[in-house]
Amino acid sequence: MKGTPMGKELLKSRSQRNLSTAFHRVSMVDKNDEMQFSAVHFDIQLVMKLLNQTIGVKRTNQKFIMIEGLCNGAKLA
């Protein structure tokens, strides 16, 4: 994603936001690298644009789509 136009836009919009200490205790191992790549660190309009593009390309006949990590705002310090 880094080399794509969307990836470059997202990286420009990134602002590091600390996650709460409660989050750190619960997930001692950040296997999904949420501290780095959680949607809360990026411009939400760009994140929604990326999701819209990705869903448009990968959409199947599934009725629902689960988007994990988008609502990590509650984990902010």
Image (tube, grey):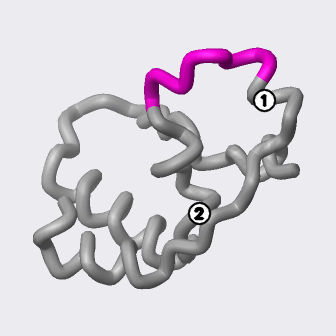
Q: Is residue 74 left or right of residue 11?
A: right
Quick one: 56 or 3, which is closer to the camera?
A: 3
Quick one: 13 or 64, which is closer to the camera?
A: 13
Please say whether residue 27 is one of the residues in the magenta stretch: yes
| Secondary structure character of the magenta stretch overall | loop
Highlighted range, magenta: 25-32
Earlier residue among tags 2 and 1 = 1
Which of the 4 image quarters holds residue 75?
Answer: top right
The circle drawn on residue 55 is none
Q: List x then y, in percent, for residue 38.
A: 54, 49
Residue at 59 percent across and 73 percent down: it is 15
Q: Amino acid at mark 2?
A: His
Residue at 19 percent across and 36 percent down: it is 60
Residue at 54 percent across and 40 percent down: it is 34
Helix or strand or loop: what does disc 2 sit on?
helix
State whether residue 25 is above or below residue 43.
above
Q: Disc 1 marks which residue? A: 23
Residue density around tag 2, few if under 14, some if 14–19, many if 20 or more, within 10 Å: many
Quick one: 73 or 58, which is closer to the camera?
A: 73
Q: List x then y, in percent, for residue 16.
A: 62, 65
Q: Is residue 20 left or right of residue 15?
A: right
Q: Is residue 39 left or right of residue 23?
A: left
3D distance between C-alphas at marks 2 and 1: 15 Å
Q: Amino acid at mark 1?
A: Phe
Q: Disc 2 marks which residue? A: 41
